[in-house]
Every structure is written in structure tokens, then in C-alpha cells.
Amino acid sequence: MHSMARRETDIFISGGGIAGLVAALSFASSGFQVVLADPTPPALDMTDSTSDLRSTAFLQPARALLENAGLWDGLACHATPLETLRVIDLDGDPPVQKTERAFYASELNQPAFGWNLPNWLTRKHLIEAATKASGLELRLGTAFEKILTREGEALVKLDDGTRLSARLAIAADGRNSPLRQAVGIPVETARYGQKALAFAVSHPVAHGNVSTELYLEGGAFVLVPLPDHDGQPASAVVWMQNGPEAARLSKLDNIAFGAAASVRSACVLGELTPISPRRVWPVVTQCADSLIGERVALIAEAAHVMPPIGAQGLNTSLADVQSLVELAQISPGMLGNAEFLTAYEKSRHTDIRARAKVIDAYNRICKSNAPPVQALRRTGLQLVHDILPLRQAIMRAGMGQ
Ligand SMILES: Cc1cc2nc3c(=O)[nH]c(=O)nc-3n(C[C@H](O)[C@H](O)[C@H](O)COP(=O)(O)OP(=O)(O)OC[C@H]3O[C@@H](n4cnc5c(N)ncnc54)[C@H](O)[C@@H]3O)c2cc1C
């Protein structure tokens, strides 16, 4: 690469999803120069065709990271606190309720387990903050194209011809990460033959800030509270199903789809009315063989993908960001060098593998249709709930503490 038109920066970030944007804003607010590129312009509302219809429960540590970067205040008014988790086991066709257990954040003296925000809205807010942040250059509509690294720098080329020299290049460009592929870090992927349908619904019964997980063979159906929509209570839904059934459901018209979702939810919140388009996501567990390469760090889904249960995915991602930012604050001069990157890998490796393992096992149990496994799940749920110390330990672990 030619050095003539090359621009220097501390950090280059490929990918402006939630993880990439939070990383960019956190580094910029710690005084680093950041350039972030992403080819996808942000969605302006939920019905936008590029809108990310997933919603994320930000757990306590993730909220703290957003607070430290001065980002929480702008998001707080859109966040729905998750005060109670209700877990219901269903059985039969049409599904009927077998057991129900509730977990209360107040038992842990916490105001909430987490705060739920629609992804498109979070991303829109973060982009607004990023356009105003000093030391941060946003290149929306521009993709990362090539990278060449040496001991002292990463040389990056964007698809608009821009050339950059960075001390650290961060891959935050999703599960098929072009930056990860460009530096040749392999991944290990486990598939379950499942897909997750993500969409939003309104319903006549108030959710009361309760998140409801409904288990049935095939996978989980999760209703997460959202703010009211046109004066009606509303929830974000993640519906996991085997591949062919998910494909069939995704093609139904809105009325038939609403009816199918209502049946699957055993009408715990009454009839569900879809209020957004549907998006289908493959359900996989995927871990990169390494979190680092020369002058390169992988974060978020570029490093690890988990099935969308237990609100672990993005929270694990934000823990990656937290770790990188802390290391950079402690020794800014080492940013991106081998020692810095080894420390990053060391601080994140065990936690990522442990979370991926637990979620993988949990998902295999939840989707199983083998009666002994179903019975085990039910007994397990009862046990966890009914033994107070165990329940509190699991709740604490789930909250990322
Ligand atoms: C249905 C569902 C529900 C979920 N719910 C939760 C939850 O409740 N809690 C939780 O913690 N997690 C949840 N997750 C996981 C969470 O959404 C992900 O972990 C998170 O969105 C990953 O973010 P990311 O920034 O790594 O990837 P993405 O959001 O995929 O962002 C990657 C970005 O990279 C960009 N990009 C692609 N190519 C290039 C290129 N060449 N150059 C530059 N940029 C590029 C893309 O345009 C995109 O904007 C859920 C996941 C699913 C599927």
C-alpha cells in the first residue's frame, strides 16, 4: 500500500453494530483517535427494511459501560426494566401450560435484571452520539476491504479507496466478519438445525415489565417487554424453531402468523398482533479459534455467536469492549502491541468459552423433544426455583455478576 494519502489513527473499527459503536464511543471518550467504517446506513424506525428487529436486554455490567461512556442517559427513557422473569413450560398440541415459575430481581436487592431496548433504536442513538463525539470519525456507507499488518501497525483499505494506518484494528463486523476472514482466523461452529424468528407484537394483556420464556420442544418462545405501541402493550419476540417450520412460519401472512404465534404463546398475554416485519436468524454457537492477530482484536459476534437465549450475546460482546478499553486506559502506549493483545485474549477467553458452553447445553435441553429431557428440564426448573440459594446463584450468574 502506498503511504502518500494514508491517514493515521489510533484505532480502526470494522463494523458499526451496537458493539462496534459502543467500542468507538468508549475509546473516543478515553481520548483515542478512532475511525469506524460500516457499509449499512442506520435504520430510522422499526418498519425500515434494514432495521435490526432484535432487542437486547442490557444487563447491569453493560449498563455501567454505557453510563461510563455517557451514553445511558439518552437511552434510559426508551428502556423497559425487566423486573421479573417468568419461565413457563408447555406441553402438547395446542400447547398448554405445565409449570410456571417466577424469578424476582428484588430478591437480589436489584431494581431489575436488565433493561430492554430495541436494537435499531439503540443503534440510531449511538450513531447520533458518534457523529457528535470528538476524536471519532464515522464512515457510514463505507466497507472495510483489505488489511496488511506488521509489528507496529495495521494498514487498512476501505472500499472508497481510503487508506489508514492504525495501532489497533478491531473486528466488530459480525458473525461473518470480513476483517477476521482477511487475517485468516478460523472459527468453530455448532449448528442445531434451528432458526430464530425475531419480531414485535402488541397484545391486550399488560406485560407488567415481566419477561416471559415459554419452553416447548423445538425451542424457546420469549416475550420481552417493550414500551406501549399505539396505546397497546407490546413485546419483542424471539421464537426458535426447527429450520423447515421456521421457514413455513416466516412466509405466513400477518393474520395467520399472529394466530400461530398466539397459539404457541398459549395466549399468556392474549392474542398477539404482529407490529413489525419478521426477520429470520440462524441459531448457532460459533467461537473464533483466537481473539487476536497481529495488531488485530476480534470482539462481539466476530469473536463469538450464541443462541439468543439468556440475554448473553451482546452482554458478552460489551464485556469484550470493556476489557479492551480498560487495557488501553491502563497503558495507552501499548495499544495494539503483542503484550496488549495477549492480555486481552487472556482476560476474555475463559469467560467467552464458559458462557458459550452453558448456552449451548441449555439450548440443547430446551429444544429437545425426548420425554426424559423434557421431564428433566421441568424438574430442573422446579429445583432451581424452589431452592433459594441455588435460585439466587443462578439469577446472579444470569445477570453477569
Ligand atoms: C434473535 C436474536 C435476539 C438476541 N437477543 C439478545 C439479547 O436479548 N441480549 C443480548 O445480549 N444479545 C442478544 N442477541 C445477540 C446480539 O444481538 C448480538 O450479539 C449483537 O447484535 C452482535 O452485535 P455485533 O455488533 O457483533 O454484530 P452485528 O449487529 O451483526 O453488526 C455487524 C456490523 O458489521 C457491519 N459490516 C459487515 N461487513 C462489513 C465490512 N466489510 N466493513 C465494515 N462493516 C461491516 C454490518 O453492516 C453490521 O452493521 C440476540 C441475537 C439474536 C439473533
Image (tube, rainbow, N blue to C red):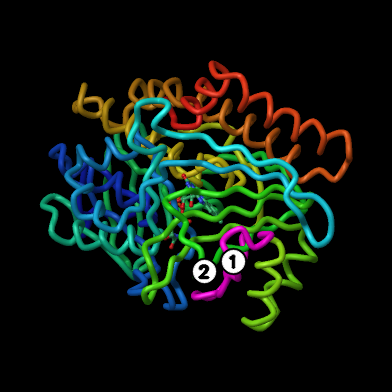
> Which residue reaches farthest top?
389
* Residue 46 in which image quadrant: bottom left
**How many tags in the picture?**
2
Q: Is residue 168 above or below residue 46?
A: above
**Residue where numbered disc 2 is placed:** 203
| Residue in the image at 69% along x and 59% along y | 266
Q: Is residue 7 above or below residue 61?
A: below
* Residue 299 in which image quadrant: top left
Disc 2 marks which amino acid? His
Instruction: Give the prevailing secondary structure in the magenta stretch.
Output: loop
Q: Judge left or right: residue 323 versus residue 281.
A: left
Q: Judge left or right: residue 16 versus residue 386.
A: left
Q: Position of residue 245 (x, y in %)?
A: 78, 65
Q: Are marks 2 and 1 in contact (CB under 8 Å)?
A: yes
Q: Judge left or right: residue 11 versus residue 104.
A: left
| Residue in the image at 29% along x and 55% along y | 36
Secondary-structure class at tag 2: loop
- In depth, the one of 45 and 351 nearer the eye is 45
Name the mark on residue 72: none
The segment highlighted magenta reads 265-281
Q: Residues within 10 Å of mark 2 (few under 14, many from 20)?
A: many
| Residue in the image at 46% along x and 60% along y | 206
Q: Is residue 284 above or below residue 386?
A: below
